[in-house]
Amino acid sequence: MASQRELDLVLFGATGFTGQLTADYLARHGGALRWGLGGRNLDKLEQVRQGLALIDPACAELPLIQAQVGDAASLRAMAERTQMVASTVGPYVRYGEPLVEACVEAGTDYADITGEPEFVSNLYRRFDDEARRRRLRLVSCCGFDSIPHDLGALFTVRHLPSDVPIRLRGFVLGQGTFSGGTWQSAVEAMGRFFKAPKQGRKKRTSSPPERRVGALEQRVFYEPRLKSWACPLPTIDPVIVLRSARQLDVYGPDFRYGHYLRVKSLPRLLMGGAAVTSIFALAQLGPTRKWLLGRRQSGEGPSAEVRAKSSFSVTFHASAGERQLRTVVRGGDPGYGETSKMLAESALSMTLDGQRLPAVYGVLTPAVAMGDVLLQRLQAAGMVFEVLTEETSQA
Ligand SMILES: NC(=O)c1ccc[n+]([C@@H]2O[C@H](COP(=O)([O-])OP(=O)(O)OC[C@H]3O[C@@H](n4cnc5c(N)ncnc54)[C@H](OP(=O)(O)O)[C@@H]3O)[C@@H](O)[C@H]2O)c1
C-alpha cells in the first residue's frame, strides 16, 4: 500500500547541515526516485530547493512538506504521503521518537543517522514489535555511525567459513571535524549518560540458543601490523555489529567483536583521552553543559575544502579456525560527505531495491535490513570494501 503513495521518500531535516548534503546527493543520484523535502521552516526549504534546481532543474518541482517535532499531526501527515522518511533531525534523543511513532502509525519505513545509543534502545523497546507486525523497516545508524563498521564486519565474515568461531577486531582511523548538530547530539548524549533510564540501555536482541555472540576484551594494546595503538571505542558501532551478528547466521556459531580507535602515538592517545574525559565531565552539570552547547551552533559544519581533505578507514583483523583475514573499508569525509552518501544510498535501497531486500522487519541494523544490496550500492558510489591479506596457518 505504501508504494502507491504520492512519494517514495521524504528527507526530513533537509535544511540542516547534513540534510542539505543528503539532498544534494539525491539531486545528483536519485534517478527515478519520487522524493520531497521536509522541515519545519518553509522559507528555508524553498532556499534548499532553489539550490538543488541548479544541480537538476527538475528539482524545482520537489514537494516541500512542512512538519515540526512537537506537532504530531504534521508528522503524521508527512509520513502518510510517503513510502519512507529519512531523518537528519537531531539530537535524536530529543527530537527523534515522535517522528518514528508517526511513521509506525502511518505504515511508513524509516531511516536515520543517529549514533545515540539511548535513542536506538528506545526504538527497540517502543516500536520493534509493532514494526514487525506491520512489516515495516525502521533502520537507525545509516551514517558513519554505523555503516562502515556494520557492513565492514558483514563483508569480512562473508570471506570466512561460517561453521567455526570467528574473532573480529575493527580499528578505526578518522580524520575530519564535526558539525554543530553532531556537537549538540554528543554533548546531550554525554549529559544524559548517568540519567538515561536503565531499560533504555538494555540490549533488545539476544543470541539464538545455538549461537554465541559477544564482545572481545576491552583493553589498550599495541597492534604491530598497524604500527598503532588500539583503544576500546565505546560508540554505538560495536553494539550494532553485535546486533547484526545475533540476527545473521553468516557470523558463525561463536562470534566475538572488539572495536578500537587506532592512534599512531601513545601521547596523542593520552591527550585525546584527556580531552574527551574533560568534555564528558563538563557535560554532567547544567551550567557547564550549556556553555559547551554554545561552542558550536546547529546548522554549522566543516567547509567543502575541509571535507575534501577528510577521510576514514576501518581495518578489520579476523581469525576463523586456521584462517586469518585482513580487510579494510575506506572513504572520504566520514561525518558529512560519506554520511550523506550512506543515508541517501540507504534510502534509495529501501525504496527502489525493495524486492531485493531480505524480508525482515522491525527495528533493524543496516546489515540486517539491507546487507549486500547496500554494500553493492556503496561500492558503486566509491566507498572501498576490500580484502588486504588472507592467510591459512598450518596446524
Ligand atoms: N552518525 C553520523 O555519522 C552522523 C553524521 C552527521 C550527523 N549526524 C547526526 O545528525 C543530526 C543532524 O546533524 P546536523 O549537523 O545536520 O544538524 P543541524 O545542521 O543542526 O540540522 C538539524 C536539523 O533539524 C531540524 N530541526 C531542529 N529542530 C526541529 C524541530 N523541532 N522540528 C523539525 N525540525 C527540526 C533543523 O531545522 P532548521 O534548519 O529549521 O533549524 C535542521 O534541519 C545530529 O543528531 C548529528 O549528530 C550523525
Image: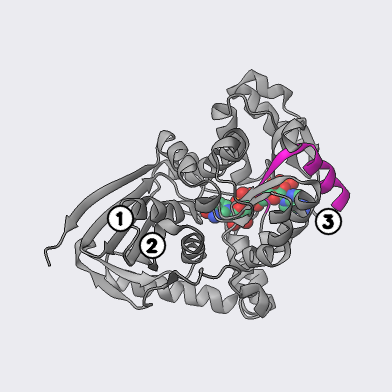
Q: Amino acid at mark 2?
A: Gly
Locate residue 125 relative to residue 203 in the image: left or right: right
- Secondary structure type for disc 2: loop
Q: Position of residue 226 (x, y in %)?
A: 23, 61
Q: CA distance from mark 2 to mark 3?
A: 44 Å
The quarter in which the C terminus is drawn is: bottom left
* Residue 266 shows in the view: yes
Location of mark 3 (residue) = 70
Above or below, comparing residue 269 to residue 198 in the picture: above
Q: Is mark 1 within 8 Å of ligand 1?
A: no
User: Which residue occupies 32% across, 56% down?
Assistant: 315
Above or below, comparing residue 395 to residue 302 in the picture: below
The quarter in which the N terminus is drawn is: top right
Q: CA distance from mark 3 to mark 1?
A: 48 Å
State which tag comes first along the sequence, 3 or 1. 3
The label on residue 252 is 2
Quarter of the image for residue 284 reads bottom right
Location of mark 1 (residue) = 160
Nearer to us in this view, 374 or 293: 374
Magenta range is 72-89
